[in-house]
Image (cartoon, rainbow, N blue to C red):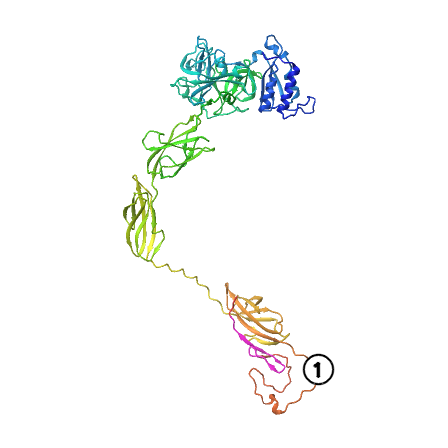
């Protein structure tokens, strides 16, 4: 019976604990618009659960995957001492009214959790427990092969199996005599076989096998194995082969974790055998439905509930989710009208044992970078996978030798399960043996065969692709020290490297092209070949000829102005320049080196407007382009003079010079000038003369100059 405290005192304590758990936020009244939620995890849930256990009617505090807190409460009807608990207070009802996510489930005394050990307790592999004197004992099941804090073999089972330490003589039982193996249903015929060990640690409930409290609600016994004939295997039997329970396994055990609500559990025990399925035909899965704290035979045990069958004798048995160890079978009870198993939380139990750990099946090392039997170069990397965050131990031995780790080395396996090592530095045929270690666990040994070859020797001189004008007198390079090097190709020889690995062979190679290869042989293994190619006395190759350029077309000709250019009076310059060219060519015209236009030659004639030219000397240049190739420039120079100012009719008449001073009278006719006929003519009208234009202006005759220019464009 728990200590009795008043209802007011219990509510006061609950209020303080709740305020602390929620960071100082007190619970609101049930009349509030939206009721607060009770905690469902961590220290806040632990504090709430153990405050609720102060109510003598509370027999379980759980939470499920939907965020609901389930309070199991003994119903008040009926007689008996247990039924009187509810009369002490109504704390559970107060909590249910305060929080919106609290549900109260009432149970009868027949539905209260009971230990599955009592006098008939069993586990994954059946065990029998006896006191120091007398034959009356109990049967349970092995939960997990384990390690003691010092690394010695051990076994975990339920704490209540030892009857608070009274049953300390522990034996394995004959599987064929266990109920799961076909023995009596009432556990009346139990056949102890091998001595298992002695109790190293045991606790049911709290410390000293008390009722239990926050952080101290266990159901675990650690048995130190003393029988050297036993071989512990980190796996769970499926009870398919009672001659050898390890011959048929439901799962290996690869890790330890916390039961996840909604995930399926697997369970194994000596009474009901292996179960990963339903309690009845209406339930096709066996999932964890809730977790928290439950009273098992007046002891509080932290754990979880799953709708799977477990009856006396299954206590201490294995509970897995996948291959992860999550719990020890602790009890059986009815929850929401169905039979459920209560599993003691494995991690909480391990923390309370003072250093015991579950034995794990460690993933073996596997080489992934090469196929077994592959050839590799000396010191080549070898990589693969193994259990994450473990240590890989490896040893190279000659092929055909037994596995030995006498001269082994180690390397770390990273968090992703990857590792890399360096192959042997000496050529030969090897087997490399691996084993993986994590804590006290060691994987099975794996092996990998490989042939190690030396790398090709180096050829230092001549260099590959080198040309010589003088004969080559030596081939030299490097290799392993004191190693035979074989030359082949255009030079054949065998030489031996010196203590530093240098080698050289004298030759006399004249003009020609050569190819020489070198290989080295170490421990009967010959390397691949290194090859160089070189020439002696060969003329340098002639440069590739420049591609022929198409011939440039001739420069275009001018029609107006003519190729001789000309002189113009300001305002009378031609506005359009015309000329002759190649049909289809493009003519570009520049005036004073500035592009003024372009045109296509049609009927061998081109025409481009330039506008009026100012007074001064101007260069007009033209070129034509055929198929992208431009001709040289053809350029003419024209001169533009200022127009004469108009004469005043009242101006002084010019004096007539004497006949002997009149140049017109006796001056001979000049080239390009028409002989006067005595007829009057307009001195400003142009006269055609050959292909040019001649202008009479102020009695002065101007002749244009022609200039042929090469294009600089």
9 horizontally vs 713: left or right: right
Say whether residue 294 is visible: yes
Q: SS of the residue at dot 1?
A: loop
Q: Residue at (35%, 55%) from the top-left corner?
A: 467
Give coordinates of residue 230: x percent, y percent. Answer: 39, 19
Give coordinates of residue 386: x percent, y percent. Answer: 43, 31
User: Which residues, given as a range, are shown in magenta?
Assistant: 689-709
Say whether residue 338 is visible: no
Give coordinates of residue 82: x percent, y percent. Answer: 59, 10
Residue at mark 1: 648
Vertical order, 623 against 166 (above or below): below
State the quadrant of the N terminus.
top right
Q: Does the magenta stretch include residue 504?
A: no
Q: Residue at (58%, 84%) from the top-left corner?
A: 674
Vertical order, 642 against 669 (above or below): above
Q: Is residue 702 magenta?
A: yes
Give coordinates of residue 323: x percent, y percent. Answer: 47, 25
């Amino acid at each position: 019976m728990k200590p009795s405290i008043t209802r007011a005192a219990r509510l006061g304590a609950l209020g303080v604990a709740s305020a602390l758990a929620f960071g100082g936020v007190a619970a609101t009244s049930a009349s509030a618009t939206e009721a607060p939620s009770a905690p469902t995890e961590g220290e806040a849930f632990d504090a709430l659960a153990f405050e609720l256990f102060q109510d003598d009617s509370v027999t379980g505090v759980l939470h499920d995957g939907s965020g609901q807190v389930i309070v199991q409460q003994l119903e008040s009807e009926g007689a008996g001492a247990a039924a009187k608990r509810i009369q002490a207070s109504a704390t559970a009802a107060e909590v249910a009214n305060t929080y919106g996510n609290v549900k109260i489930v009432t149970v009868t005394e027949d539905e209260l959790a009971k230990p599955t050990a009592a006098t008939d307790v069993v586990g994954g592999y059946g065990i029998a427990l006896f006191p120091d004197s007398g034959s009356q004992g109990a049967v349970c099941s092995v939960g997990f092969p384990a390690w003691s804090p010092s690394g010695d073999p051990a076994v975990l089972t339920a704490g209540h199996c030892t009857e608070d330490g009274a049953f300390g003589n522990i034996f394995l039982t004959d599987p064929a005599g266990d109920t799961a193996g076909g023995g009596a249903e009432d556990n009346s015929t139990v056949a102890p076989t091998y001595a298992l060990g002695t109790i190293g640690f045991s606790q049911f409930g709290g410390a000293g096998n008390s009722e239990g409290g926050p952080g101290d609600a266990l159901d675990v016994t650690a048995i130190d194995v003393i029988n050297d004939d036993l071989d512990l295997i980190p796996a769970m039997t499926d009870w398919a082969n009672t001659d050898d329970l390890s011959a048929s396994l439901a799962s290996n055990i690869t890790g330890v974790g916390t039961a996840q609500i909604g995930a399926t559990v697997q369970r194994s025990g000596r009474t009901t055998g292996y179960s990963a399925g339903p309690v009845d035909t209406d339930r096709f899965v066996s999932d964890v439905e809730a977790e928290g704290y439950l009273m098992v035979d007046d002891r509080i045990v932290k754990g979880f509930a799953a709708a799977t069958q477990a009856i006396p004798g299954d206590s201490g048995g294995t509970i897995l989710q996948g291959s992860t160890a999550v719990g020890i079978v602790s009890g059986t009870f009815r929850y929401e009208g169905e039979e459920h198993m209560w599993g003691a939380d494995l991690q909480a139990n391990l923390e309370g044992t003072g250093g015991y750990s579950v034995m794990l099946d460690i993933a073996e090392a596997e080489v992934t970078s090469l196929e077994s039997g592959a050839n590799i170069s000396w010191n080549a990397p070898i990589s693969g996978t193994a259990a994450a965050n473990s240590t890989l131990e490896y040893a190279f031995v000659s092929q055909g030798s037994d596995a030995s780790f006498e001269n082994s080395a180690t390397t770390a396996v990273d968090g992703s399960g990857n590792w890399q090592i360096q192959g042997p530095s000496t050529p030969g045929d090897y087997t490399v043996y691996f084993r993986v270690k994590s804590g006290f666990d060691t994987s099975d040994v794996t092996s990998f065969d490989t042939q190690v070859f030396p790398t090709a020797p180096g050829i230092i001189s001549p260099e590959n692709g080198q040309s010589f004008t003088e004969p080559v007198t030596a081939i030299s390079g490097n290799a392993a020290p004191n190693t035979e090097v074989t030359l082949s190709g255009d030079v054949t020889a065998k030489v031996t490297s010196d203590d530093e690995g240098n080698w050289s062979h004298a030759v006399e190679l004249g003009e020609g092209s050569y190819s020489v290869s070198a290989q080295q042989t170490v421990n009967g293994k010959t390397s691949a070949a290194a090859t160089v190619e070189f020439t002696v006395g060969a003329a340098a190759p002639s440069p590739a000829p420049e591609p022929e350029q198409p011939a440039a077309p001739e420069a275009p000709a001018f029609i107006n102005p003519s190729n001789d250019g000309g002189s113009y009076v300001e305002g009378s310059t031609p506005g359009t320049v015309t000329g002759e060219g190649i049909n289809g060519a493009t003519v570009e015209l520049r005036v004073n080196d500035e592009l003024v236009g372009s045109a296509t030659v049609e009927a061998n004639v081109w025409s481009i407007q330039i506008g009026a030219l100012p007074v001064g000397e101007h260069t007009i240049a033209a070129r034509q382009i055929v198929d992208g190739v431009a001709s040289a420039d053809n350029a003419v120079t024209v001169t533009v003079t200022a127009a004469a100012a108009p004469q005043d009719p009242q101006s002084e008449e010019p004096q007539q010079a004497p006949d002997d001073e009149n140049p017109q009278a006796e001056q001979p006719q000049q080239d390009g000038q028409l002989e006067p006929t005595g007829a009057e003519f307009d001195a400003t009208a142009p006269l055609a003369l050959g292909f040019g234009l001649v202008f009479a202006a102020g009695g002065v005759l101007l002749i244009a100059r022609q200039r042929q220019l090469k294009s600089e464009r």
